[in-house]
Every structure is written in structure tokens, then in C-alpha cells.
Amino acid sequence: MYLLSNRGSAPHSIPLPKRARGKGEEVMGYKIVSKKEICPNQYELLIEAPYVVRNAKAGQFIIFRVEENGERVPLTIADVDKEKGLLTIVFMAVGYSTKKLALLEAGDELVDLVGPLGKPTHIKNYGTAVCVAGGYGAAPCYLISKALKEAGNKVYMIAGARTKELLFWEDKMREACTELYLTTDDGSYGIKGFGTTVLKEIIEREKVDYVIAVGPMPMMRAVAELTRDKSIYTEASMNPIMVDGTGMCGACRVTVGGETKFACVDGPDFNAHEIDFDEVINRTKIYKDYERKRDENCNLLKNTK
């Protein structure tokens, strides 16, 4: 059986592995090799997915389903081992599907996993590049930083979180870049403050040719404003607003340079200086009250705890 990639991604077909369930019945399955809680409520899964990792590149994403009737959830690819056919994803358990995913253990299997989807990050030898990651953005930024370094760039990576316990992959990130800066809002580890403070210091002391930001919308907007006056080409990842992953639902539409784009098929990376961040941020607030009430009253969510 084959799953065809959606529009906007490189044209290819992905053979899906099979496993047996019951007598004569076959369903799709992707085995979880290992599971780690890398910080509170945030998990790292290593999954057997040889046909996915074979063509995967930094910045792309996958879509998974935990169960037969489950929802489709997009997650950015955090790492790949093409030799062993292993895919790494990092996620926070915040909704029904990710909480169900967090209940799985090594040896369990996902029903569906498709990818790689989306357009890869624009990797080339820019000269000096800076990757700015906020919170969960450290995972995709790791793979981007690694690719930029392999392309010959001098790579600074800035990874920030609210507090020390929310930082992860420090050793991996150090290997993936030329120099790593860690920041915490409360000063419990690394530099006290925001990643934009470190970015400002770097661009004031030397020439920077490329910046990419992955993380919360306010952080990415701040990075874009900081580099705008210096005319540094800057990209921001719109992966946080993706839902369907195929361009059909329209939830990830974003105005870029006055044109409507879809993060899942046209991105997820876009020129940060052309993104209408106010529009995106305002739209992400629409369902805040609904989500709060859902978390309080939804029996499905309660059953995953």
C-alpha cells in the first residue's frame, strides 16, 4: 500500500510497513523503539520508519495517528538515523492525541505515520548562521543547526526556556553547532533573559548572514524585528499553527508578503520579515476559552490521565 504526499511537498510515494493483528488481518504500524520524558510533560520517541527517514530533511514534518479513528497530528522531525531507519520526534502532551501518544511505551506501535511533508529549511553555506529556539522549538532547531553546520556554516544556536527543567538535549545541541547559548527566563540555568538578548549581542559584534527562529510566536516576532534593521535574511517556522497538514483545513493560513500561504504545504518556513505576526497571534487566541473549558470538562482528556 502507498500513501501519496500532499501538494507542496516533493512528489514521492511512501510504502507503509505492515504488521499482523488477529487472523489474516493486516494493519499499518510503526514501532516505538524507545521513549523518554526529557522534561516535564515533554517526550522523545524513537520510531522505526525507514521509508520516512530515507528522504527526510531538516524542517520537514510527519503526521501521525495513535489509533484507527484518531485525529491526524503534525509534528516536526527532530532527528533521523537513515542508516538504522529511525525517526525521532519530540512532543508536549497537551491535547487528547498527544496525551494518548504519551501513554505508549517502547514496543507499542502507531497506526499511521506519513512523511516527510512540507518544504525543507533552506540549507546552504550562508557564512554565519544563528538558530534561535524557544521551548519545544529546540528539537527541530537541532536538526536545522546540524544541517547548516554540515553545509559549512559557522552556526550559533540559542536555546531558551522559562526555567532549567524545561531545557533538553544540551549535549546534542552542542555537537550540532559551533557555539551554544542557553537562556532561562528565571536565570536558573545559563544566561538569564531571552534569546533575543543573546542574538542582539551576536549581530552587534559580527556579521550574521542568516537567522532562523523556531518556537512561540511572540519570540519569533521579536527575532524578526531585531534582524529587520540589520537586513539579515531571517526565517520563522509556522509549524505551531499546523493542524491538518495537507492544506485542506485552512487553519495554518498565514499572510506572507501580502499573500495568503499555508504553513503545511508552502512552508513551514517563511521570510520572517514578511509574515503578518499580528494576524497569526490574534487567530491563535480565538479558541483559548474553548480549550480551557474543554480541558476542564472533556471526559476523553480525563481518561488519558
Image: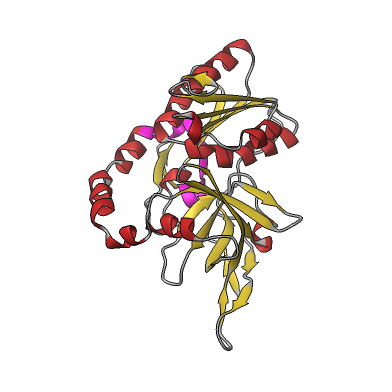
Q: Is residue 26 above or below residue 166?
A: below
Q: Residue at x 45, y 61 (%)?
A: 72
- Of all residues shown, which one is farthest toward the bottom? 23
**Horizontal and vertical percent position of residue 85:** 70, 58
- Taking the magenta stretch, the answer to whether it contains residue 264 is yes
- Over which residues does the magenta segment extend? 263-277
Q: In front here: 70 or 262?
A: 70
Q: Is residue 260 above or below residue 160?
A: below
**Horizontal and vertical percent position of residue 22:** 55, 84
Q: Place residue 107 in its image quadrant.
A: bottom right
Q: Quadrant of the C terminus?
A: bottom left
- Is residue 230 in view from this perspective? no
Q: Is residue 146 left or right of residue 3?
A: right
- Taking the magenta stretch, the answer to whether it contains residue 190 is no
Q: Residue at x 45, y 72 (%)?
A: 68
Q: Is residue 180 left or right of residue 82?
A: left
Q: How is the image coloured?
A: secondary structure
Q: In front here: 169 or 282?
A: 169
**Horizontal and vertical percent position of residue 269:** 53, 41
Q: In front here: 148 or 35?
A: 35
- Is residue 289 in view from this perspective? yes
Q: Is residue 59 above or below residue 170?
A: below
**Horizontal and vertical percent position of residue 44:** 56, 49
